[in-house]
Image (cartoon, grey):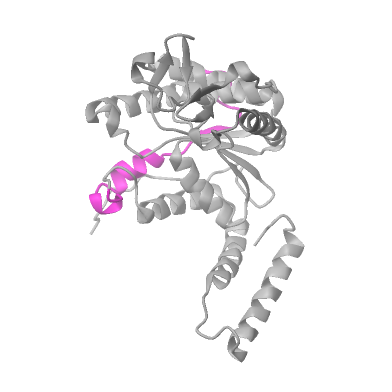
Amino acid sequence: MLLQTQIPLKKQADNQIDYSSKLILIGSCFSENIGDKLSYYQFQTIVNPFGILFHPKAIEKLIIDVINNKTYSEKDVFFNNEQWHSFNAHSSLSNANKETLLTTLNTTISKTNQQLKEATHVVITLGTSWVYKHITSNTVVANCHKVPQKEFSKEILSVDDISKSLEKIVSILKTTNPNISVVFTVSPVRHTKDGFIENMQSKSHLISGIHQFLASTSLNQQNNYYFPSYEIMMDELRDYRFYSEDMIHPNQTAINYIWDKFSSNWITDKAIKTMDKVATIQKGLAHKPFNPTSEQHLKFLKKLSIKKETLLKSFPFMKF
């Protein structure tokens, strides 16, 4: 008896992820969910260096600035609610000190530039097609930072807008790093603040825009891919027991389920065996003994240390 519909997924035939891969995840908060999993299993992973970015235009602006090694100056930041902000970055980078914010932005630009040059995979998770345009500067922002809404106009990106934005992103990435693999996915998090109907319209534009790009550009045979995170949530996990209490975000069970699909689809069989070893160490490190000084626990720690040292000989970049 089948109790759910299954989205058919085949093991990725080429450019799979292993422990030599260097990954950068950019986009919505779901990027961080998958990024946390990759980090837990000790893959070489960078997640949202400029914080959560929800829409394609914000990611496009970020990639262009990073590749061009943009230098942020006083004209690129503003003061609001007792903190300095950049319209191009998430509020997690904001700071009460202007110079600190500028230093953070410029350091992050420099680091991310080098990381993109060395990356084997970029995973881009799109969250919404809705964007806010700052009226005074006539620019689309990544984050409004609680600036009064009257200072922005709200627009939805068309399917063509999204497809063209993705083409720019991939084109500039591959100008710098020709062999990089780009994996697109759509976040299963619903943006209900835009409205329920508007959220569905937004997700539809994202999915159509991605597939239009993949199908119609000359770059579509150059290591560009799609992973159906949104579709797995909507079709395989269509039950509110897979949502957190806000009924909007996937809960941990759903995140684990989608991660299992992603890892079995994208990660090499050899790396999955290493993941099992990493998980054993991580669980051992998280273990809280009843008696930390007992002989049994000391033997356990010694065995765990040996396992860790053995793994580090093969993968010195791991940090437990």
Residue lying furthest bottom in this view?
295
* Quarter where residue 61 is shown: top right
Magenta segment includes 226: yes
Give the side of residue 139 with respect to residue 269, left or right: left
Eyeballing the image, is 180 above or below 36? Answer: above
How many labels sit on residues?
A: 0
* Quarter where residue 127 is shown: top left
Numbered range of the magenta stretch: 217-245
Q: Nearer the viewer, residue 202 or 226?
A: 202
Q: Nearer the viewer, residue 146 or 285?
A: 146
Q: Where's the N terminus, which quadrant?
A: bottom left
Residue under the image location 39 percent in, 18 percent down: 159
x and y percentages locating residue 219 in the rendered image? 58, 22
- Can residue 214 be seen here? The reply is no
Magenta segment includes 163: no
Give the side of residue 131 with respect to residue 238, left or right: right
Residue under the image location 69 percent in, 21 percent down: 71
Residue lying furthest front in this view?
82
x and y percentages locating residue 2 in the rendered image? 25, 56
Residue under the image location 61 percent in, 35 percent down: 181
* Quarter where residue 171 is shown: top right
Residue under the image location 40 percent in, 20 percent down: 131
Q: Where's the C terminus, which quadrant?
A: bottom right
x and y percentages locating residue 212 in the rendered image? 44, 21
- Can residue 281 be seen here? The reply is yes
x and y percentages locating residue 9 in the rendered image? 43, 45
Eyeballing the image, is 186 above or below 275? Answer: above
Eyeballing the image, is 285 above or below 74? Answer: below
Q: Nearer the viewer, residue 252 or 104?
A: 104
